[in-house]
Amino acid sequence: MSRPVLGVLFSSRDWRGFLSGTGKERLDLYLKAAQNRGLRICFFRVEDIDLKSMKVRATVRTKNDRWLKVNMRLPQVIHNRAVHRVGTAEGVLKTLESRGIIIFNSWNNYGKLRIHRYIYSNPVLRRYLPETCRFTQSNLKRFLEYNSFFVKPDRGSVGRGVIKVSRLFANRWIVTRQVKDRTSTDLVRTDSLYRLLNKYTGRRRHLLQEAIKLLTYKGSPIDIRVAAQRDGSGKWQITGMAAKAARKGGYLTNVFQGGTVIRLDELFTEPMHRAVTRALSNAALEIAEHLSRRLPHLADVGFDFGISRDGKVYFIEMNFRDQRYSLMLAQMPDAYYRAYDNPVAYGQYLLTTMKGRSSRRSR
């Protein structure tokens, strides 16, 4: 009996990164997880799919450890690791789903404001949310009551384009922009603040978000990446978590912007470490469960949480394609491997569930 097949969908850019050795994805860990679970696994892009024949030109690993392109039937379950824009790719994914193909994390290009509203719709979860709204002139006036806040692109990653606005004194503000190791600042009056920010944001949608007084590490603010995934039983679980500290003098914790990854047990001693881990796990699982009711087949995400100086947990943002390297940089090899194993296990769970339903229908 042939082994069931799980597909993993990449973007062309990710695939070029793999071929050139510069990509972040670890295909060897996908292969190891699949082998351990008795699955076959294949990799492909949207442009490799033929909707007419429902076949795909996929890349597989042969028994003699060579990569091979093969034409094959589309797998019934696909793990999406590609971030696509609205357009052709979205249409292909929707067509596949309409034909019974299960794609988990099928669409992962949601705006931050949309996710904020989904979470806000649950009164129990609102306690995790800093004040957040769309960047407009009228909303900016309301945010002037805060001493510090952020202006963020609604869609974006690795901290690109995030602006920090801080009150200097009554009618003066410091506008700070950080790009990796470079920081630029503007000193501006209140009546000129919107005009300056609007120049930097351009036509792209941005949001305003209250700045939380975060815990610090060696004087730099920290937030914590929490990887949440469905496992082989279909249930949400926490794969791992690691802190990220901004570079000296910076405010962005992203590794791409010069941030440093730190293990939580290096930051907190017991019993604080246990308490922090429990609070973050509870928040992540509550939010993941809630969002998965709005976003079918959501299964693999990374949350960024902040902890205020008074110990309160805040949701900062959600990554639908967690790059997983925080766990690697934190030297957590077991958690890093689980980040690849869990999607494979969940794929196996879906394949088994589909097979069971098909058997019952045929009786």
Image (spheres, helix red, strand yellow):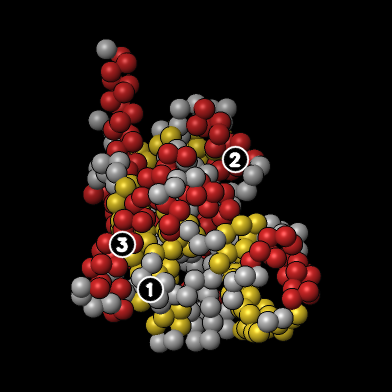
Q: Decide: is 16 above or below 350.
A: below
- Picture coordinates of residue 141, whole percent (x, y): 70, 65
- Picture coordinates of residue 249, whole percent (x, y): 53, 86
Amino acid beneath label 1: Asp
Earlier sequence position, callout 3 versus callout 2: 2
Q: Secondary structure at mark 3?
A: helix
- Mark 2 sits on what residue? 90
Q: Decide: is 43 above or below 361.
A: below
- Mark 1 sits on what residue? 310
What is the CA distance from the residue labelled 1 to the residue labelled 2?
43 Å
For disc 1, the neighbor class at 10 Å (few under 14, some 14 to 19, many from 20) is few
- Mark 3 sits on what residue? 279
Q: Decide: is 232 above or below 209.
A: above
Amino acid beneath label 3: Ala
- Taking the spot 30% from the left edge, 41% from the top edge, the residue there is 234
What is the CA distance from the residue labelled 3 to the residue labelled 1?
14 Å
What is the CA distance from the residue labelled 3 to the residue labelled 2?
36 Å
Q: Secondary structure at mark 2?
A: helix
Tell me whether circle 1 and circle 2 mark residues in contact (CB < 8 Å): no
Quadrant (top left, top right, bottom left, bottom right) of the N terminus: top left
For disc 3, the neighbor class at 10 Å (few under 14, some 14 to 19, many from 20) is some
- Picture coordinates of residue 271, whole percent (x, y): 20, 73
Q: Secondary structure at mark 1?
A: loop
Earlier sequence position, callout 1 versus callout 2: 2
